[in-house]
Amino acid sequence: MARKETGNLGVGSNVVELLLPHRRPFLMVDFIDTFLREPDPFISACRHISANEEVFNGHFPNLHLWPGVYTIEGLGQCCNLLFVLLGFQRGWQRQGGDPEDILSALRNIELGYKLRPGFREDIAEKILEPLESQVKLGVSSAVDIKFLQPVFGGQRLDYLVTLTHEIENMVRFSVEAQVEEKTVARGVMTATHGFPVPGLIKR
């Protein structure tokens, strides 16, 4: 999976928490760099792994080895993020809007969280909240991941996820995790979607 274009979204953990129900210590995505709808829906995101992670107290003492299951969870959360963003765009387009409006709204919200000029509080209410009921999360139903290299504290873990198949309420993703552009894990994840997103875009 060589699809890692320069980011067109660039939103951090506060916006991620508006799109996913997960919270610390089980939120595995810190930043969404890129979302592309065509030719195949794609997302790139990352997790900055601190040496202060609670899990390193037991996995393992004196060796900050990131659990592989956490990498799988991060990839799964990116699959959900991709499908949520895609759902937003599809819903907005059905209402006659431009799909790019969704990304603009999220970037605007990011401005607010970063205390930067240009933030407009009405953007989320106008575009995102009316779509909340249309967006559904997915739950993994099959995971086939191969680990190629270990991941350690102090590293940035990059996630690359592409939606490859969508049949009724089943979706399949090609997933890859990288550290310093070297693949540490790759595989396929399949999910069943149709679960409402709790508390989306609620402050």
Image: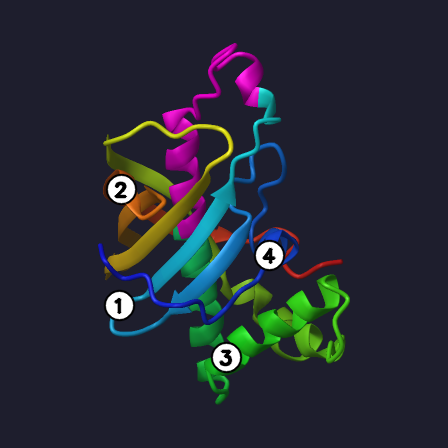
Q: Is residue 23 left or right of residue 86?
A: right
Quadrant housing the N terminus: bottom left
Mark 1 vs 4, N-terminal side: 4
Residue that label 4 marks: 12
- Does 135 sit above or below residue 54? below
Which residue corresponds to mark 3? 92
Query: Identity of the amino acid at label 1?
Result: Asp
Does residue 130 appear anywhere in the picture? no
What residue span does the magenta drawing correspond to?
55-78
Which quarter of the rendering shows the C terminus? bottom right
Going by the numbered disc 2, the residue's amino acid type is Thr
Q: CA distance from mark 1 to mark 3?
A: 19 Å
Residue 141: percent from left, percent from top: 31, 38
Task: Indicate the secondary structure of the residue bearing disc 2.
Answer: strand
Give yes or no for residue 182 being in the magenta stretch: no
Q: Position of residue 143 (x, y in %)?
A: 27, 36
* Residue drawn at 28 percent across, 30 percent down: 149
| Label 4, label 2: how far apart the Cα atoms are | 23 Å
Disc tally is: 4
> Sequence order check: which comes first, mark 2 or mark 3?
3
Residue of label 1: 40
User: Circle 4 sits in a helix, a strand or a loop, which is it?
Assistant: loop
Q: Which residue is mark 2?
A: 183
In the rendered view, tell whether residue 147 sits above or below residue 107: above
The answer to which of marks 1 and 3 sits earlier in the sequence is 1
Q: Nearer the viewer, mark 1 or mark 3?
A: 1
What whole-number distance in Å separates the C-alpha atoms at marks 1 and 2? 21 Å
Left or right: where 199 falls relative to 97: right
Q: Earlier in the sequence, mark 1 or mark 2?
A: 1
Image position of 201 (left or right of 192): right
